[in-house]
Amino acid sequence: MTIGVLAIQGDFDAHKKRLEELGAKVVLVRKPEQLDEIEGLVIPGGESGAFLKILGDQGVAKLKEFVRVRRNAYGRQIDSSIRTGKLGESPLEMVFIRAPKIERVGPGVEVIATEGNDPVVVREGKAMAATFHPELSQDRRVHQAFLDLVKNGHSPA
């Protein structure tokens, strides 16, 4: 399985390392045509305005927005924190850095992980989104759930 990691901004190397530890072949995606070579795509946290500028119209046309979020919902960068949430019913370490908040989910959206009452990992079809940085934790389960989603069309969580 070949997974792309958008290598424009954010800690794309940490995502690459996690996915490779789990056995995936990883391509650092810097050009829109590379999207045709992969089975799944990780978009690291970063400034969406920079993504749009660097990718251009062709690249943006290949990416779709799957969830609506409120930026910095858990505080500014100085308020970054490590919290314990739940992946299914199991505890999960979560690193929040200027994290957005999922304010609502549609009927086709599955909540995979929560922090308090807030959904923090969601899935719809073959798209998965996290509001925290799973690549900064030693726990590989969020990345494994993503690989399972790409491979099987669903995550085990």
Image (tube, helix red, strand yellow):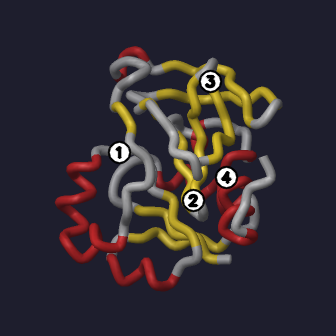
* C-alpha span from label 4 to label 1: 18 Å
Q: Which amino acid does label 1 sit on?
A: Gly
Q: Which of marks 2 and 1 is in front?
A: 1
Q: Tell which of 35 and 117 is nearer to you.
A: 117
Residue 115 point in image, percent of width and height: 62, 24
Distance CA(mark 3)–CA(mark 2): 25 Å
- On screen, residue 88 above or below 8: above
The kind of residue on which mark 4 rests is His
Disc 2 from disc 1: Cα separation: 16 Å
Amino acid, disc 3: Glu
Q: In this view, does 45 lie above or below 126?
A: above
Residue 143 drawn at (x, y percent): 67, 52
Gap in angstroms between the C-alphas marked 4 and 2: 10 Å
Residue 60 vertical position relative to residue 138 in the rendered view, above or below: below
Decide if residue 74 is on the left or right side of residue 137: left
Pointer 1 residue? 46
Q: Determine the secondary structure under disc 4.
A: helix
Residue located beneath label 4 in the image: 143
Quarter placement of the N terminus: bottom right
| Disc on res. 79 | none
State which tag comes first along the sequence, 3 or 4. 3
Cβ–Cβ under 8 Å for marks 3 and 2: no
Q: Is mark 1 on a helix, strand or loop?
A: loop
Whether label 1 touches label 3, CB < 8 Å = no
Residue 16 numbered tag: 2
Q: Earlier in the sequence, mark 4 or mark 2?
A: 2
Find disc 3 in the rendering and name its residue.
115
Residue at image location 52% in from the left, 35% down from the top: 132
- For the residue pair 131 and 19, the one nearer the viewer reads as 131
Give the residue drawn at x 50%, y 27%: 96
